[in-house]
Image: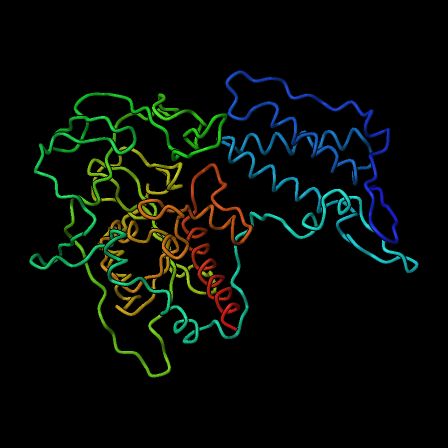
Amino acid sequence: MASKTTSTVTPKRVAHSPSLQSLKKPVIPKEFGGKVPTVVRQRYLNLFIEECLKFCPSNQEAIEKALNEEKAAYDRSPSKNIYLNLAVNTLKKLRGLGPSTVQGLSKSGGRRVVSHEVVLGGKLAAKTSFSISRPTSPRVEDLKGAALYGRLRDYLLSEDQLKENGYPFPHPGRPGGAVIFTAEDKPPKDSSCRVCCRCGTEYLVSPSGRCVRDEECHYHWGRPRRNRAAGGWETQYMCCSAAIGSAGCQVAKQHVQDGRKENLEGFVKTFDKELPEDAHPGIYALDCEMSYTTYGLELTRVTVVDTDMQVVYDTFVKPDNEIVDYNTRFSGVTEADLADTSISLRDVQAVLLSMFSADTILIGHSLESDLLALKVIHSTVVDTAVLFPHRLGLPYKRSLRNLMADYLRQIIQDNVDGHSSSEDASACMHLVIWKIREDAKTKR
């Protein structure tokens, strides 16, 4: 049971009882080349044990439960950063199981009773928490339907913002063609020579797009990030904390290219539609997943959610070209998902054109990437990457995962099996509605 302290003025720190201090806690063995430092795992294991001792009937059961929780977090984590997120969530969950969290502050006999957790953790201990549950829509009457649509129009990207963020525009001289204003004008190159978008290596392909030579791709899947170090700053990859220029921490069977900005044909454009007087053109959040083919990145899944976070369209898509890498770490798409799929890109375009009009507001994170994969031209968009800009400006953009953690205290994309397109789309919708509500507070 959690110890309690009674105070009439200011809570004082109460040390753990000698029995807890003298408890022999298990030690995590050192693992050579482990993805998470042993000292980090040991620290969280000790914290888990302390929390489990508050509600488990015996010390042995508390230790076993803590060991199982720590092992589960480690097994689910491909990297240290993911482990830290999972460990924080586990710690919050365990604190919620303790009797002290049911009633953090209560009154007994006219005197203020303060839980041990509140004494040690301060005011924020009982207020701040992270959740891995999916975000739900805020139930606010004035943020529905036409009212929400009217508010969102203030957050639409301007034409200049669309251009500088790489959104596709109709080609003035080629029907079905698109133009991107951020694309660099490069002289024609040999179509058989490509540059790997993961490791930067040049490689040769046959006319069918297959690699001429069997060559493994060694790359870092994490972005470079600057960290403070002794005497200044150092830049490391987020995936493995290795220094810039080091050998890749991941190995793929072959090199791949993006290719979406090189073939700007086959695009469709949303068009105007007549609506009843009491209706609005609609508000949706959209997210796509892509896999590598012999052509480049191609659409393999698309999900659309409405303002109530309900999925209104979700389908796997069979690419036009042969898949060479399912990109499962990020797409969440596997070979089994596409085994019985016959839906093509043209089928998806037809459905989306029937759902959307030119005035429908589409919400997404770096939505230009999704529209390029869909080969859809649409300019009525709210982009969370622009709505919450990086402090250094373009081309830097904050990740959706970081935005959800910083502003809504929720952890997403923690599944080692890959991203969930419905989770990402719902997160974008939730962020935009939160932004509207926060801005409304400052205008009062």
Residue 185: image quadrant is top left
Residue 222: image quadrant is top left
Structure colour scheme: rainbow
From the viewer's perspective, tell me whether residue 52 is left or right of residue 139. right
Quadrant into which the N terminus falls = top right
Q: Residue at x 69, y 34 (%)?
A: 48
Q: How many marks?
A: 0
Q: Residue at x 67, y 53 (%)?
A: 127
Q: Find residue 271 and report its horizontal and vertical position in percent.
A: 22, 68
Q: Find residue 125 and report its horizontal and vertical position in percent.
A: 69, 47
Q: Nearer the viewer, residue 349 or 107?
A: 107
From the viewer's perspective, tell me whether residue 318 is left or right of residue 128. left
Residue 387: image quadrant is bottom left
Q: Residue at x 27, y 26 (%)?
A: 254
Q: Find residue 298 and report its horizontal and vertical position in percent.
A: 26, 44
Q: Nearer the viewer, residue 168 or 157?
A: 157
Q: Residue at x 56, y 35 (%)?
A: 84
Q: Nearer the viewer, residue 40 or 164?
A: 164
Q: Find residue 269 and report its horizontal and vertical position in percent.
A: 20, 62
From the viewer's perspective, tell me whether residue 40 is left or right of residue 294. right
- Residue 398 vertical placement versus 295 (above, below): below
Query: Which residue of the protein is positioned furthest toward the front in this rendering?
Result: 231
Query: Which residue of the protein is positioned furthest toward the right in this rendering?
Result: 109
